[in-house]
Amino acid sequence: MIIVAVCDDDTKIGAELERALIGIFGNMQVEHDIDVFFTGEELCRRMEAGAHYDLIFLDIEFAKNEINGVEVGRLIREAQQNNIVSIVYISREKDYAFQLFEIRPLNFLIKPLEHSAIEKTVKTYFKIAGLWSGEFSYTVGRDTFKVKTKDILYIESRNKKLILYFADGKTVEFYGSLKEIYHDQLKKYDFLFIHASYVVNFDYVSAIRYSQLSISDSATPLPISQGRRNEIREKYLEIMKRRRV
């Protein structure tokens, strides 16, 4: 089941996009639920009330007295601390790349929308979502445990131990090599080796700066070592570009 929101103040475009998505999901034999909104405020209120969406198609230009799509995206990412939902922006203009950088959209579609572009975006979403089915294994004593990579915020190396931080606030300590688990298990799932002591899940990065990055739901930023700063920025941009293909 995939739950989708379409948000566009042009009722005709909203209806056309909904019909296109219904057809695409039908051909893919994917169960789906689609909500259509005509203002960004309405979408934000629904999400604040607890609505969950896997994928949002969000227009950028709304009426002058309404918040635009860029502001809606920032509210979702920052105020609501939702870094999981995939956002696809739609617009008649192309010059929004810089404004959208921190929102990390899945894609940017130009109106009039082409069915092939919508279908490609949906398939890209499913390809990326498939990364979240990965598992990470670790050993405590003689017992081996497996967890979903999507549930990991980051891993810290401290006092010869590794500390696994989960999205739900739980932590687990075990022995191991941070370098080895990154290369053997986590690199392929878009984790970032930002420091000798930290490996971070890209999907929970809320902001990246020159010498540090911020993690969702954490007030304390993590350091990016001096020797890795250029590499991490390039890797971050490469992941963003690949995920928007």
Image: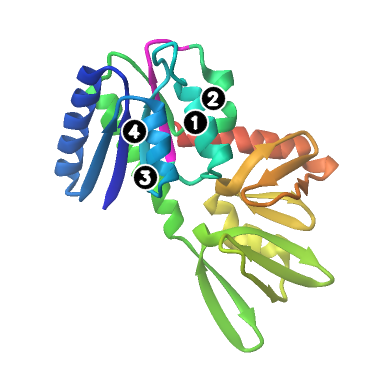
- Element at badge 4? helix
Mark toward the start of the polypeptide (2 vs 1): 1
Q: Name the residue that disc number 3 marks.
A: 53
Check if mark 2's residue and mark 3's residue have beta carbons within 8 Å. no
Measured as percent of width and height from the top left, residue 5 is found at 32, 37
Residue 139 as seen in the image, left or right of residue 107: right
Q: How many marks?
A: 4
State which mark lies toward you, 4 or 1. 1
At label 1, which amino acid type do we have?
A: Gly
Q: Which residue is drawn at the image coordinates 65% and 52% (left, top)?
A: 200
Name the residue located 42 percent from the left edge and 59 percent from the top edge: 133
Answer with mark 1 or mark 3, whichever residue precedes in sequence: 3
Q: Which mark is residue 73?
A: 1
Q: Looking at the image, do the residues carrying marks 2 and 1 touch, with CB atoms under 8 Å apart?
A: yes
Q: Is residue 199 magenta?
A: no
Mark nearer the N terminus (4 vs 2)? 2
Q: Answer few, some or many: residues within 10 Å of disc 3's Cα (few below 14, many 20 plus, some between 14 and 19).
A: some
Q: Which residues are magenta?
A: 86-94
Q: Which of the two marks, 2 or 1, is nearer to us in this view?
A: 1
Looking at the image, residue 112 sits to the left or right of residue 130; the answer is left
Mark 1 vs mark 3, CA separation in Å: 13 Å
Give the dominant element type of the magenta stretch: helix, strand or loop.
strand
Mark toward the viewer: 4 or 3? 3
Q: Which residue is mark 4?
A: 121
The x and y percentages for residue 76 are 50, 37
Label 2 belongs to which residue? 100
